[in-house]
Each structure stands twice: as structure tokens, then as C-alpha cells.
Image: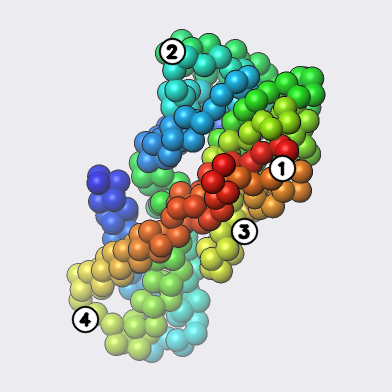
Amino acid sequence: MLFTLGDYLAGMLVGAVTALGVRMLVKPGMDMVIAMLIGMGLGMVVHFVLGLILSPAIGMFEAMIPASLIGMYGGMFFAMRDSMAAGSRSLTAALAVGALFGLIVVAGVHFYDRTLRGAVVDTGE
Amino acid sequence: MDTATQKKWDKVSRNFDFLTWGDDQRLGPHKRRLFSKMNGAILMLAAGTGNDFRFFPPGHSLIAIDISAKMLERAAGKVKAYDGRIELRQMDACQLEFADNTFDTILTVCTFCSVPKPVLGLRELYRVLKPGGQLLMFEHVRSRIGPVGVFLDLMTLLSRRLGPDLNRDTVGNVLKAGFRIRREENVYLDIVKIIEAVKD
């Protein structure tokens, strides 16, 4: 139960930090493709650093796999919004969107894990 | 002895228990369930710092090997806590110093992500396992989920310098070594797996 909570908190942290980084680097009017590439690169760095820090506490794969998806896709998504000035008006709102994105990705990974878990091959011996 | 691998794991041994704390807590119950199937003459590969000894059912006698002397130094303290007998020996998984058909059960935990020549190592296990003997593995492998698999490929470029590869096809390697898969179970996504194989 505590580990599940930890997964969600970790995902929210990675999402919020990625959104913060993107907000600082990507300005409205920036070329969207460049902005998305910057967001993706930044998200990957954030996921790698935070994933390594969080791994001892919640497990390597449980930390790194959701974080990689949040960093990579979240970074692109936040950068797209910010470059179009279609994103959150305040920094607080941007961080909240980042955290929400992290939460949704972790929930998705948990759901997918549930569907995959269990025997793939079982001869019954 | 593969000295490059030995040195790498000697270095990791200092922080190994700290780095794997979360994994041990989360995956421990699955390991305990797998180890409940061990029987007869038992060999454990890559014992590491002995973190997994606490998941063994009591009363068994086994040999646990590791390539790293520093890992084994740390494991020695945990041997005493086990209600059974564990003999620690420094050995390379690819050059096992045992006769053919010696063991009934061989255990591996996150081992074949790190053995540089995995099929060669698995063939060694095949050699020392008795006919009808079982190979019980708790391993992480490359994911078949598109973006996750690519991510693990990229991470391996870095992770193999510090420790394990993250993109091994261990199930395929087990088959290549001559084993038959008795059971394969996903523990986390399709990355962390229990693999039970048999030497027919």
C-alpha cells in the first residue's frame, strides 16, 4: 500500500519537475517542433535523475519505467502547450498539470501491469 | 575468472543493499513463493550480498556462489541468520567447478542480466543440473512493449557500465541452452519474471 502511494507521489514529482523545467525553457511563440524536442530531452534528464534517486525507495523498475514515460511524453506535451501559449496561465497551474499527468501515467502503468501479471506459460507440472 | 565482471561487482557491493532495498521489499514475497519449490542438492548463482537468503524456506543445505569476493564478504554475515546451511564459494557462472549432473535445483536471482555470456553460463547450469532437475529463475528481461523496450535498450548503454544489462532475452537464452520452460510468470509488467525450466 505504501509502495503504491510512493509510486503515485514519485510520478507526480517527475511530472511537476518536468513541467517546471519546460516552463522555464520554452517560451510562447517558440517553434513547436523545437519546443517539443527540448521538452522531450529535458523530461528524459529529469526522469533519469529522479528515477535514480527514487529507485532505492520504491524499486528500480517501478521508479524508472513510469518516470521514463512521464518525462519523455510529458516533456513533449508540456512544451507543445507552452509554445502555443495554450498552457496553464500560472506556474502553479503548470505544476498541477504536470503532477496530474504523472498521476495518470502511473495509474495507466499500474493498470497495464495488472493485465500482464501472472502466468504466461504454465505446463502444470 | 572474468576479472572485469568481478571488479565491477566488487565496486557495486558497497552500496548494493541500499540500492536494492525497495526491490527487496516489493519483490520479496514473489521470491519466497519461487524458493518454496527448491529441493534436493541446491546451487544458488550470484548470491550477491545474501539479501535473498531470508526468503529461503528453512532447513535446506545449499551452495551459494558469486564472482565477487566483496559481495561474498557481505553475504557471510547473512548466512548466520539462515535456519539451515549455506556454503559460500567464489566462482564464475561460466566456469562452474562442479561435476556434471550434481544439482537437483539451481536458483538465480537477477543473474543473467549480468553474466557477460548468458547462453554459455546457462549451458554450464545445464551441465551441472541432474536430468529432471529444475532451474528456478527470478530475472528481469527486455520488455516487448514498444517504447518500454526501446527505453530499456537505451538505458542499457549506461547501466552495463555500472551493473546489469536491462535488455536481455533471458527466456530465449534459457531455451537456447537446452532447457524446457515449465512455467513463465510476469511479476512486473513483462519485465520482471519468474522462469521455471527443466532439464529433460
Mark 1 and mark 4 residues within 8 Å of each other at the beta carbon: no
Residue position for label 3: B153
Instruction: Say if labels 1 and 4 share a chain.
Output: no
Query: Which residue is at 76% across, 24% downward?
Result: B101
The first of marks 3 and 1 along the sequence is: 3
Residue at (50% x, 76% y) in the render = A37
Residue shown at 43%/76% (left/top)? A76
Front position in the image: B78 or A98 = B78
Q: State the image coordinates of residue B17 (x, y, percent, origin top left).
A: 45, 29
At label 4, which amino acid type do we have? Arg
Q: Which mark is residue B83?
A: 2
Toward the viewer: A81 or B193?
B193
Q: Looking at numbered disc 1 in the image, what kind of residue is underneath it?
A: Phe
The reply to whether the C-beta atoms of the residues labelled 3 and 1 are less than 8 Å apart is: no
Q: Chain of mark 1?
A: B
Vertically, is B92 above or below A30? Answer: above
Which residue, given by chain and number where applicable, does mark 4 sit on?
A89
Q: Are circles 4 and 3 on residues that touch, CB within 8 Å?
A: no
- Mark 3 vs mark 2: in front: 2
Tell me the SS state at disc 3: helix
The answer for how far apart the CA atoms under marks 3 and 2 are is 40 Å
In the figure, is residue B155 to the left or right of A95? right
Determine which residue is flagged by label 1: B179
Q: Between residue A48 and residue B113, name the one nearer to us.
A: B113
Residue under the image location 29 percent in, 60 percent down: A12
